[in-house]
Image (cartoon, rainbow, N blue to C red):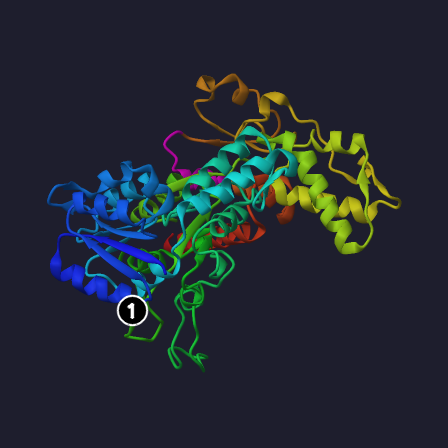
Amino acid sequence: MTHALIVDDDVDSVATLQELIASEKFTVSVAHTLRDARRHIALQQPDVVLLDLQLPDGNGMELFSDPQLVANSEVVLITGHASLDTSIQALRLGAADYLVKPINIRQLQGVLSRVMKPAALQAEVADLRSNLANSGHFGLLWGRTPPMQRIYEQISRVAGTSVSVFINGESGTGKELVAQTVHDLSRRRKKPFLAVNCGAISPNLIESEIFGHEKGAFTGADKQHEGFFERASGGTLFLDELTEMPLELQVKLLRVLETGRFMRVGSTVSIDADVRVIAASNRPLLQAVQAGKLREDLLYRLNVFPIEMPPLRDRLDDVPLLAEHFLIGIGSKEGKSKRFTPRALQQLQTYRWPGNVRELRNAVQRAYVMATGDTVDEQWLPRGELNPADSGSPQGGAGVPAGGSGVSSSGSAAMPAAQAEVSGPSVVMPLGSSMAQVEKAFILATLQHYKHHKEQTAAVLGISLKTLYNRLKEYAAEDAAAADNA
């Protein structure tokens, strides 16, 4: 039978908590001090420890110094003070979750339903890491280069906790795969993983889609609808392109994260939200805040554990591995295996891949279809020499492919040589321009340069086609408003 240890000096709180835990078919023991807690742990190793920090003989975090406890017992922090900093510190030391007094019964039940020995989670991660050299992948992610090794290390550390994760990176770098891998290695793996692209849902419907609605809440609401928070209960909700979410809805999302409760549209009854939220954006986060696309308080609430995805041009040694993986998958679906020629793999590594892994996958699929025999050569693969000096430059900067647009300021004489030598069309912006103004000018200039070919423009900019359409819609509305005010 699963055993729980409550470490708390609040007698009334302990009595209630003990009864609740016992009703979930756990055996329960109680310690009111650190000394008592150590004695109970020595007598019977608990499966889960519900730990208060403020104890008569010290701070509850002192128990984390016991390696046996951290390895074999899931530690859940219970506190009467909802301090995010304290909770994060405990999570970094090894706590799996935290609960705020008074304890919410549904949240407690959720925590108890996910009890798993930390050593079991660590063994899974260790197994993935040990097989990486042979398999070439970690969870759903493929690659062996140092940038990807860093991503795997971050996932390994954060997956077993309840910490909020914010994944940042260009479109097509695999942000959703990171979120899915975090979920698969977490205690929530048996519950749903739901991914929501905030830029792909109409602003008029996004609140209803995320929080749900009651019958008759608005025209067309002919029945009750469960939103993503309800459907992902106990699991993970991945909010992709968060900066495309309307600001008024970001306020409501922040409220849910702070209180753990939400209401359907048209309802006055609040519902518990037992969901881990992972967010992602292809915009630089501080730039999104400055441009008014992301609330600063929401950023800091979600960006507890940031993960920065590298663009494919910064890990070109992974390209052959990824290409082979995609080719095998396509061959399995189509019922005919094909292989790359050495020259084809070499050519793939000389291309810049502005659309990142997504563009590589599409290129492999196209080449597979066009290859008439059992081999895929370089004929139908993208061409373009990659300047080694540009391999680490940011998308849309000095490393823009030949014929692309560069961005410079009126003070270009003071710019680094690598930027000053950009050839081809450029956009000149005065110093003091906001990031939003620079972004708008650069997007419109790139669109014009590629003769309003939106797919090609989105690929070069490293954003999704949906994001490009959203930006263009915003700019059209801004220009119309400016014309009305003139």
> Is most of the magenta stretch helix, strand or loop?
helix
- Determine which quarter of the picture holds residue 108: bottom left
Instruction: Characterize the local packing of mark 1: few (<14), some (14-19) or many (20 or more) Cα atoms within 10 angstroms.
Output: few
Q: Which residues are magenta?
A: 431-441
In terms of depth relative to the viewer, which is nearer, 242 or 61?
A: 61
| Left or right of residue 37: residue 256 | right
Query: Amino acid type of disc 1?
Result: Ser
Q: Position of residue 276 (x, y in %)?
A: 39, 55
Q: Give the residue at the far front of this rendering.
A: 43
* Point 22% across, 45% down: residue: 39
In terms of depth relative to the viewer, which is nearer, 252 or 438?
A: 252
* Point 41% across, 70% down: residue: 212
| Left or right of residue 46: residue 195 | right
Residue 408 seen: yes
Of the 4 image quadrants, the one containing the N terminus is bottom left
Residue 400 seen: no
Residue 375 on the magenta span: no
Q: Position of residue 56 (x, y in %)?
A: 10, 45
What is the secondary structure assignment of the residue under circle 1?
loop
Return the residue at label 1.
23
Q: How many marks?
A: 1
* Point 46% across, 18% down: residue: 413
Q: Give the residue at the far right of this rendering.
A: 373
* Point 79% across, 46% down: residue: 368
- Determine which quarter of the picture holds residue 228: bottom left
Q: Position of residue 235 (x, y in %)?
A: 43, 59
Residue 107 vertical position relative to residue 313 in the rendered view, above or below = below
Residue 391 vertical position relative to residue 140 in the rendered view, above or below = above
Q: Position of residue 154 (x, y in %)?
A: 45, 38
